[in-house]
Amino acid sequence: MKRLAVPGIATVVILAIVALLIYGVASKDSSSSSLDTAVQRGQHPAAPGATRELPALSGGGSHRIADYRGKVVVLNFWASWCTPCTDEAPLLQRTQAALGSRGTVLGATYNDVPGDSQDFERKYHVTYPSGRDVGLKLAQDYNTHALPETFVIDRAGRVVAISRGQVSEKFLRSAVQKALAS
């Protein structure tokens, strides 16, 4: 009888450990504190780091998401060395023009040399404001680790759409309309 009890107990313990691991992974993935999860659920969480200052890439001063309260902000993390960033730059520029006085595209450079970022802006005729994310603090607020990434923020300062990867015209059109309607 004792010989059967040991393997039985070991099996129960192993199953309990596996169940705890599965529960831990599942609860981490569906965490309601995750920006992505909240937006996927149709919630519109406050934009993280809204008061964080980014030194302006050109012209001096600084930029903060909060400076654009009452307007739509298309926050785009980019770098001059990022091929998809070069591909989406014309689309972001067209979005800037379409927003007009209703909002702005706001670029945040990611691990980029300021001179290279400025050359990128000249080459791709970027006119929307960009700031240097020194120390990647704003990127950390948005859990950004790969480029490009774009967050559409409504006039009340809430994130309404996220694109982790190169944006498409369809995504931007839909996300900006949602932000304008909020």
Image: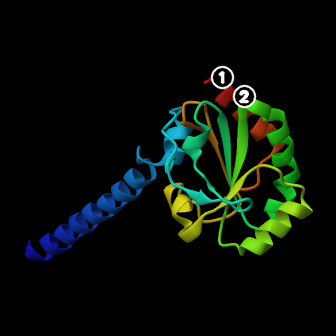
The answer to whether residue 123 is above or below residue 160 is below
| Residue 123 is at least partly visible in this image | yes
Residue situated furthest left in the rendering: 2
Gap between marks 1 and 2 measured at Cα:
6 Å
In the picture, the quarter occupied by the C terminus is top right
User: What residue is rendered at 76% in x and 54% in y?
Assistant: 166
Q: Is residue 74 above or below residue 18?
A: above
Q: Nearer the viewer, residue 29 or 78?
A: 78
Q: Is 120 left, or right, of 29 in this rendering? A: right
Residue type marked 1: Ala
Who's the residue at 40% across and 55% down the image?
A: 28
Q: Are marks 1 and 2 in contact (CB under 8 Å)?
A: yes
Q: Position of residue 120 (x, y in %)?
A: 84, 66
User: What residue is disc 2 on?
Assistant: 177
Q: Which label number is shown at residue 181?
A: 1
State which quadrant residue 21 falls in. bottom left
